[in-house]
């Protein structure tokens, strides 16, 4: 029995959110110029931690109320930062794709949306959202007994009542997709994936498959996360994943992917939502595809410590995801013109990625252009894959490679380089989470 033809899937809208702001324009401009957003944390006092720098989104560059209809603004009270980022990213992606949904400007009551809502899906990767410390401890403080000790009994009878109504709804990972689907009336297949840094890439892969088999004509897909709070930072410090930022060291120079002397990564907040759409749907409405999602695969790394702090140093599973995505795109490894790796600056993970690229590309591994992300915007957790795919799509659209920063002669990439024009037909995006899950996506330039 012959396999039915796969629908071709393209990207028609980009909605990245990073420390440079909302949209591709500010992010791309910074990457072309070689400007990093990594700097000392300003939102709270992190001076007691060995790492006190990250890529924060300045308050003046992002306000979630600007991205929801007036009728929905009360719902922002039950949005954690992660949810806010996803909502803002989705709005930008829909706008960039030229779609009309019930929430977009110009969508009058009873107006017909661009695509039938039951043919639009939503797949968004999320992290394990930590509760706001001030909000939680204020309630915990009211559950002390006469001796000043925390009491579970008092917590149950009066402490919890001091949490805001619907408190839990702010911190459920599936609420990113929940709010986005309500705002944009996505009635097609929907899902939430929580696999650490690989969450967004896995979500994009799921959207690709849903559209390929005809269960939707388009999907809002990606991920977002904000770990820039004491609990999120402390967890990464204990896992020894963050580079120290002592006084006098410029945080913008700290993250050095594939440098054996690298001391770790730094966190960022952000992510992105993309509009994935069937090529026939995009053509029918006169949309111009940005790039084609040509191949996808995933794998799970063996973690010798069993908890995912370390991954298999041979890179075997990462290589399998890369090779299978390339095969899924119907091309050979020699057709890949650039790679967007995870490139975290965490030495053992970078070493496994480098080994994987060596397995897949052989002698070409050290000569294929590498597009860095984390030295610019930090590790955005569940949003990493969406940012990487959005940047790769922009590279294909502009036929340009952004600048490389923080590279040394001991790095996988020989030295730093300014942005440059290039002939780009296929770009491989590979995201490996700190828990061992890997996803690889091949993008193809669209004429």
Image: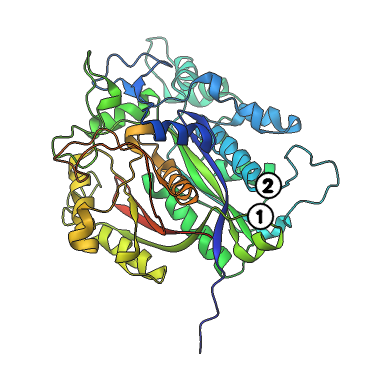
Disc 2 vs disc 1: Cβ atoms closer than 8 Å? yes
Q: Position of residue 298 (x, y in %)?
A: 36, 60
Would residue 268 be visible to someone looking at this image?
no
Q: Residue at x 27, y 53 (%)?
A: 368
Label 1 sits on a secondary structure element that is: loop
Q: Taking 399 as reference, is 52 above or below it?
A: above
Residue at image mark 1: 287
In the foreground, 193 or 441: 441
Would residue 293 be visible to someone looking at this image?
yes
Q: Position of residue 213 (x, y in %)?
A: 57, 70
Q: Residue at x 56, y 32 (%)?
A: 84
Q: Position of residue 143 (x, y in %)?
A: 46, 18
Label 2 sits on a secondary structure element that is: loop
In the foreground, 393 or 350: 393
Q: CA distance from mark 2 to mark 1?
A: 8 Å
Q: Residues within 10 Å of mark 2 (few under 14, many from 20)?
A: some
The quarter of the image holding the C terminus is bottom right
Residue at image mark 2: 98
In the foreground, 318 or 394: 394
Q: Which mark is residue 219?
A: none
Dot 2 or dot 1, earlier in sequence: 2
Q: Residues within 10 Å of mark 1 (few under 14, many from 20)?
A: some
In the displayed orientation, state which residue is furthest to the right: 110
Q: Residue at x 85, y 42 (%)?
A: 109
Location of residue 365 by image quarter: bottom left
Q: Taking 364 as reference, is 19 above or below it?
A: above
Q: Taking 219 as reference, is 413 above or below it?
A: above
Q: How many marks?
A: 2
């Amino acid at each position: 029995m012959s396999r039915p033809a796969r629908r071709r899937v393209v990207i028609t809208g980009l909605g990245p959110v990073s420390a440079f702001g909302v949209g591709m324009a500010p992010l791309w401009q910074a990457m072309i110029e070689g400007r990093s957003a990594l700097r000392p944390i300003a939102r709270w006092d992190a001076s007691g931690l060995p790492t006190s720098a990250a890529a924060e989104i300045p308050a003046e560059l992002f306000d979630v109320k600007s991205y929801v209809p007036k009728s929905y603004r009360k719902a922002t009270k039950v949005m954690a930062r992660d949810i806010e980022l996803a909502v803002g990213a989705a709005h930008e992606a829909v706008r960039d794709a030229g779609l009309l949904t019930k929430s977009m400007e110009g969508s009058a009551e009873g107006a017909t949306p661009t695509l039938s809502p039951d043919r639009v899906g939503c797949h968004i990767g999320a992290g394990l959202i930590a509760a706001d410390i001030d909000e939680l401890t204020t309630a915990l403080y009211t559950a002390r007994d006469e001796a000043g000790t925390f009491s579970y009994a008092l917590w149950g009878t009066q402490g919890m009542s001091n949490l805001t109504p619907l408190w839990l709804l702010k911190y459920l990972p599936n609420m990113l997709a929940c709010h986005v689907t309500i705002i944009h009336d996505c009635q097609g297949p929907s899902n939430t994936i929580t696999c650490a840094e690989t969450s967004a890439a896995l979500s994009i892969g799921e959207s690709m498959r849903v559209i390929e088999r005809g269960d939707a004509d388009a999907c809002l897909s990606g991920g977002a996360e904000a770990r820039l709070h004491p609990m999120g930072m402390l967890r990464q410090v204990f896992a020894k994943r963050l580079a120290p930022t002592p006084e006098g060291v410029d945080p913008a120079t700290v993250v050095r992917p594939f440098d054996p002397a690298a001391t770790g990564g730094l966190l960022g907040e952000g992510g992105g939502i993309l509009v994935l759409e069937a090529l026939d749907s995009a053509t029918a409405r006169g949309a111009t595809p940005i790039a084609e999602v040509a191949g996808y695969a995933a794998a799970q790394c063996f973690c010798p410590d069993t908890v995912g702090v370390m991954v298999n140093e041979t890179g075997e599973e990462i290589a399998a995801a890369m090779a299978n995505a390339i095969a899924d795109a119907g091309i050979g490894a020699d057709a890949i013109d650039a790679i967007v790796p995870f490139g975290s600056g965490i030495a053992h993970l970078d070493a496994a990625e480098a080994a994987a690229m060596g397995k897949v590309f052989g002698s070409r591994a050290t000569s294929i252009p590498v597009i860095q992300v984390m030295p610019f915007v930090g590790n955005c957790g569940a949003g990493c894959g969406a940012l990487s795919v959005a940047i790769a799509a922009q590279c294909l659209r502009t036929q340009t490679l952004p600048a490389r920063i923080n590279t040394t002669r001991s790095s996988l990439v020989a030295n730093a380089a300014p942005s440059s024009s290039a002939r780009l037909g296929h770009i491989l995006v590979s995201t490996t989470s700190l828990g061992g899950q890997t996803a690889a996506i091949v993008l193809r330039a669209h004429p």
